[in-house]
Image: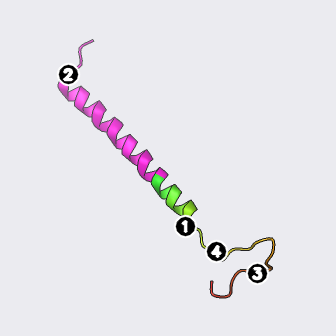
Amino acid sequence: MTWSPQRKLAITGAVLAVGLFIAANAYLITIAVLSQPDCTLSERAAAAKPAC
């Protein structure tokens, strides 16, 4: 099977788009996990900080 340049370009573009989508979501998940506030319940405290 011979691949036309247009088909190669379409497949390459689709792969790049999916890769960019996955990378962006991984970045957003990482930022969401790392930026959690300190005003949450813990084992030592009965309630969250009043400033929250």
Q: Earlier in the sequence, mark 2 or mark 1?
A: 2
The disc labelled 2 sits on which kind of residue? Ser
Q: Quadrant of the N terminus?
A: top left
State the CA–CA distance, disc 2 to disc 3.
64 Å
Stretch of the chain drawn in magenta: 1-26
Circle number at residue 47: 3
Residue linked to disc 4:
38
Q: Is residue 13 magenta?
A: yes
State the CA–CA distance, disc 1 to disc 4.
9 Å
Relative to residue 52, is residue 19 drawn left or right?
left
Q: Nearer the viewer, mark 4 or mark 2?
A: 4
User: Compared to 24, does 15 lie above or below?
Assistant: above
The disc labelled 1 sits on which kind of residue? Ser
Q: Residue at coordinates 71% horizontally, 80% vertically from top-left? A: 48
Residue toward you, 32 or 45: 45
Residue linked to disc 1:
35
Q: Residue at coordinates 30% horizontally, 31% vertically from top-left? A: 11
Q: Residue at coordinates 29% horizontally, 33% vertically from top-left? A: 12
Residue linked to disc 2:
4
Q: Residue at coordinates 52% horizontally, 56% vertically from top-left? A: 29
State the CA–CA distance, disc 1 to disc 3.
20 Å
Residue toward you, 2 or 20: 20
